[in-house]
Amino acid sequence: MGIKNTKLWEAVNALVYGEGDARSRVCVACQILDKMNSNELPKDLQKRIEIIKNDAGKNGALRDSEGNVIRDRYLHTSKRRINRTYAKLAREIYAIYNELNSR
């Protein structure tokens, strides 16, 4: 089985080999997935990726009084949510990766 999408593979690699808890690994994976073009995956899988990213970053970025980003949307959101939620997001990213590579 070959790699059908490099960014998705890098995101899964971050989930598997990254340091920290599920929250920190999903944050890194989502930062990688942000760099993926919307036409790189079939529409159904891209929609699922967008749902994951929106869930993982739903609180938006943390900014200072001048509007500079202190924490991106994923890191900021993760500070207020439980690890179990991120374990679920990690499983979904992995499921998308498997589904893409089985097509």
Image (cartoon, rainbow, N blue to C red):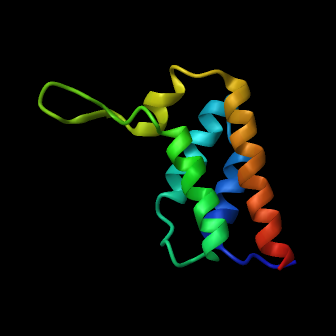
Residue 81: quadrant of the picture = top right
| Left or right: 39 in relation to 101 | left
Looking at the figure, which quarter contains the N terminus?
bottom right
Q: Position of residue 74 (x, y in %)?
A: 48, 38
- The residue lying toward the viewer, choosing from 87 and 50, is 50
Q: Quadrant of residue 60?
A: top left
Q: Assign the C terminus to one quadrant of the image.
A: bottom right
Position in image of residue 24 (x %, y %) = 60, 33
Looking at the image, is 49 positioned above or below residue 14?
below
Give the image location of residue 101, x and y in percent. Answer: 81, 74
For residue 97, above or below residue 27: below
Q: What number of labels is visible?
A: 0
Q: Residue at x 75, y 75 (%)?
A: 3
Is residue 16 visible from the viewing direction of this image? no
Can residue 74 be spotted in the picture? yes
- Look at 72% across and 78% down and name the residue there: 4
Quadrant of the rendered structure where residue 70 is? Answer: top left
* Relative to 80, 64 lies left or right: left
Residue 2 x %, y % = 81, 79
Q: Residue at x 86, y 75 (%)?
A: 102
Residue sitting farthest toward the left:
66
Of 68 and 41, nearer the camera is 41
62 shown above or below 15: above
